[in-house]
Each structure stands twice: as structure tokens, then as C-alpha cells.
Amino acid sequence: MSADHPRVDRRPGSRFRRPRNCMAPLVDQLMEIIELQAGRASEPYDHSSYAWRLAAGREHGQDLAPSLTRAVADLSGYSPVVSALVERLRLLSADAPPPREAPDMVHADFKPDNVRVRDGAVVAVVDIGNAGSGTRATDLTTLRWYTFQDRLDCARSRLWTRILDLIGWEQAAVLTATQILTKLEFPFVTASR
């Protein structure tokens, strides 16, 4: 998109350019909140390393969620189709190097249920019990997962660009694989209860 494109929002204070027809002002606010997490890690839980281990099927390191790790490890037993998907995701992540140390705060569950909005503005982010350290791209990846609606196409594109700027393709693939694995795990666990 050229700098003089007529549909780009150039309002003062707007860090993330978006087409004027984009219906994603809340996503813009959430992206700004996530950017505030840069360099603010205060918890010892390394979510980036955990995501890498979960996606690649690695066993070493601190396990932040043992029951989730076991459930994801057991996914292959549900069906040949699920097994093939898990194997492809693991292969995709296998050659990615471990994430570099990232000093950002990570919410680790940055989804719509955990965002409070009043009068069109984000007023709170809740459920910080799993917060830790890592890369803020973890929260951007989660936010991107929850923007799969046509009216948010423009937001997804900006989120993806920012994720790639922060961590590159290999680590972005690992975070995406982790999202898929954890989302696959949830229906199987709740169905077996």
C-alpha cells in the first residue's frame, strides 16, 4: 500500500495504519496494549519456550501446564486424521530453533473473554493468572486467532505483519502450531468429561 493511498487512516496518534473501512478499532486498542508489554517481563514462566516445546513435541524444560501438555501429547490417539495433523504441525516446528530470550510480559490467554469493553473502549484485561515472560507475539498470535471474521480481515493482516516483524516466520509458525494444538485439545478434553 503506498504512503499516499487514500483509504489509509492517518489520524494523529494512530500507530497502526488501517483502511478506513476496517471495523477493528478494538483490535487496534488491543495491539497498543500488547505493545506496552515490551520489556516488562516480571514472571519466571517462559511462554515462548513452552510453546516451542509443545509444538515441536520436546520434553525438556519447565512445564507450565502439565495437563495441557499431556492432553496435546495424547491428541494423536483420537483419529488418523488428527494424528496426521499433529504430525504435520510437529514437523513444521521441529527445525525451528528455540526462541531467543524475550523480556516481554505475556498474558498467555489474550482472548475476547478476557477483555472488558465499555463504550467502544478497552477498559480492562482480566485473567492474568497465567501471565509470564516470552515474546508479546504470543498474545498477538492469540488475538489473531480470534479475528477470523470477514469484517476483521484488515486487522488480521496487521496482526500477522507485526508478529512477523517481532519473531520471523519460523517462530510465527511455532506459535501458530501451538494455537492449533491447544484448540484441538479443548474439544477432545471437554467431550471426554
Image (cartoon, helix red, strand yellow):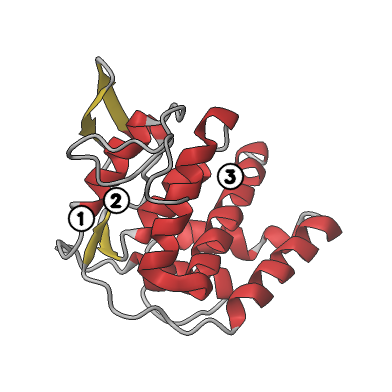
Question: Which residue is nearer to you in this view: 17 or 34?
Answer: 17
Picture quadrant where residue 136 is located: bottom left
Q: Which residue is mark 3?
A: 186
* Closer-to-camera residue (46/167): 167
Q: Spatial distance from mark 2 to mark 3, Cα to Cα?
A: 19 Å
Q: How much space separates mark 3 and mark 1, taking CA atoms?
A: 27 Å
Question: Disc 1 vs disc 2: Cβ atoms closer than 8 Å?
Answer: yes
Q: Which residue is mark 2?
A: 107
Instruction: Relative to 56, say whether 177 is above or below.
Output: above
The quarter holding residue 18 reads top left
Instruction: Provide residue 17's location: percent of width, then percent of height.
Output: 35, 43
User: Vertical placement of 65 versus 30: above or below?
Assistant: below
* Residue 74 picture location, percent across and down: 66, 62
Q: Nearer the viewer, residue 65 or 111?
A: 111
From the viewer's perspective, is 169 left or right of 104?
right
Mark 1 vs mark 2: in front: 1
Going by the numbered disc 1, the residue's amino acid type is Gln
Q: Which residue is mark 1?
A: 37
Question: Of residues 13 and 68, which is closer to you in this image?
Answer: 13
Crowding near pointer 3: few (<14 within 10 Å), some, many (20+)?
few
Say whether residue 177 is left or right of residue 167. right
Q: How far apart, in angstroms, are the residues tagged by discs 1 and 2? A: 9 Å
Q: Residue at x 57, y 75 (%)?
A: 56
